[in-house]
Image (cartoon, rainbow, N blue to C red):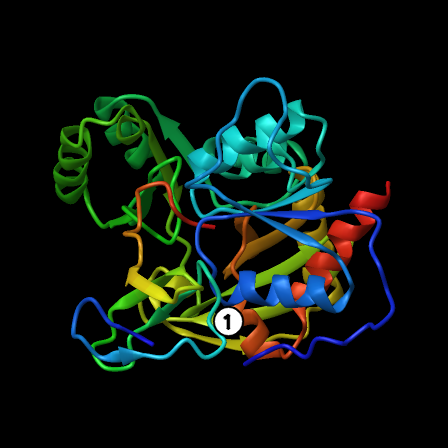
Amino acid sequence: MTECPECGRAIEKKNLIEGEIFPCPDCGVELEVTSAEPFRVDAAPHEEEDWGE
Amino acid sequence: MRPRTKKRTGVSSAFTLGLFYTVIRPEEKWILEAAEARGIPVERLHDEELTFPLVRNGFKADIVLNRSVSHSRSLYALRFFEHYGVPTVNPYEVVALCGDKVLASLRLAEAGVPTPRTVVALTPEAALKALDEVGYPAVLKPPIGSWGRLMAKVDDREEAEQIIEHKAALGSPMHSIFYVQEYVPKPERDVRVFVVGDEVVAAMYRYSSDWRTNAARGGSAEALSPSPELEALARKAAQAVGGGVLAVDLMEGPDGLTVHEVNPTPEFKALTAATGIDVAGKVVDYVAEVARR
């Protein structure tokens, strides 16, 4: 269990894996799992100019 | 929607798949699951952490699947993997070509693939001439870029002057190369065909009230059963750029289908949801096929 760095909501690990991005269920900010064990999340990286498909 | 991944018990792999990635989106998670279901060990290669010496060390992957969202990181990394003798999906050449709209247009035209009328200009002054040649409305795109970023629909010369001035002020040399394309009046949708090797694996319409129909800009998707003509054109476009795992984007204009983009690191979350097809599984099967060559 950890918390959203933006709104403080509790975030459960469930089946999230390291590197996975997902929206905070409360504030909607995009988060990234920076570590699976111990479970940590941070704001997802910002889109850069050359990002895409 | 989550694709159905078949469990293939008792299968063991003779190779390790390197997943080169920036973040784990549903696409990458499905790829990891598809590899696991096939007994293929995966080495995760995070593009923010790797270093690339001139002599290979530090990783064991036998083949690399590129899922990095950064075009620049992809290009250098793929060239290094190639240098180390590790095959990649897609190859460096394909990503370099598709990532540059100018080079991609040239290659598609050389292969006889219909594309929207395109004129390239190398200075702001020439860009105005290029827009006059194409006619208004026209579309101005950065040669490198995706997700519809910094694209502009230009309705008249006055607007063109303002947009070009803004682009030039951005300062980057890439914003001083002007890729001008005719504006194709199309239904509020475009077509995406996902090609893996020689196979058209799935297709969809992408709907949007925005003139840009990129799924990344929102909008909705609907499964499409491609006609033989559409399949043939998508396959031809994919082969023209070198083949691999590619999403071919087409528009339905008054003069028929045109290919406006071939994406070398395609997203397929919306496509999977719309079609129910296990696109990730198809991608992993193709990587396994390339690894066996």
Residue drawn at (63%, 31%) of the image: B81
Label 1 sits on a secondary structure element that is helix
Considering depth in this image, is B167 or B43 the residue closer to the camera? B43
Q: Position of residue B151 (x, y in %)?
A: 30, 47
Left or right: residue B133 versus residue B62 is left
Residue drawn at (87%, 69%) of the image: B10
Chain for disc number 1: B
Question: Is residue B234 something one can see in this rendering?
Answer: yes
Residue drawn at (34%, 64%) of the image: A40
Q: Position of residue B120 (x, y in %)?
A: 39, 29
Considering depth in this image, is B267 or B248 the residue closer to the camera? B267
Left or right: residue B163 versus residue B88 is left
Left or right: residue B210 versus residue A38 is left
Q: Is residue A34 above or below residue B209?
A: above
Left or right: residue B131 versus residue B87 is left
Displayed quadrant of residue A39? bottom left
Quadrant of the image containing the C terminus of chain B: top right
Considering depth in this image, is B129 or A34 the residue closer to the camera? A34
Quadrant of the image containing the N terminus of chain B: bottom right
Q: Is residue B24 above or below residue B75?
A: below
Q: Is residue B6 above or below residue B161?
A: below
Q: Position of residue B268 (x, y in %)?
A: 55, 64
Mark 1 crowdedness (10 Å alpha carbons): few <14, some 14-19, many ≥20:
many
Number of numbered discs on residues = 1
Q: Position of residue B198 (x, y in %)?
A: 78, 52
Q: Amino acid at mark 1?
A: Ala
Question: Is residue B201 something one can see in this rendering?
Answer: no
Residue under label 1: B270
Residue drawn at (20%, 66%) of the image: A5
Identity of the residue furthest to the top in this view: B54
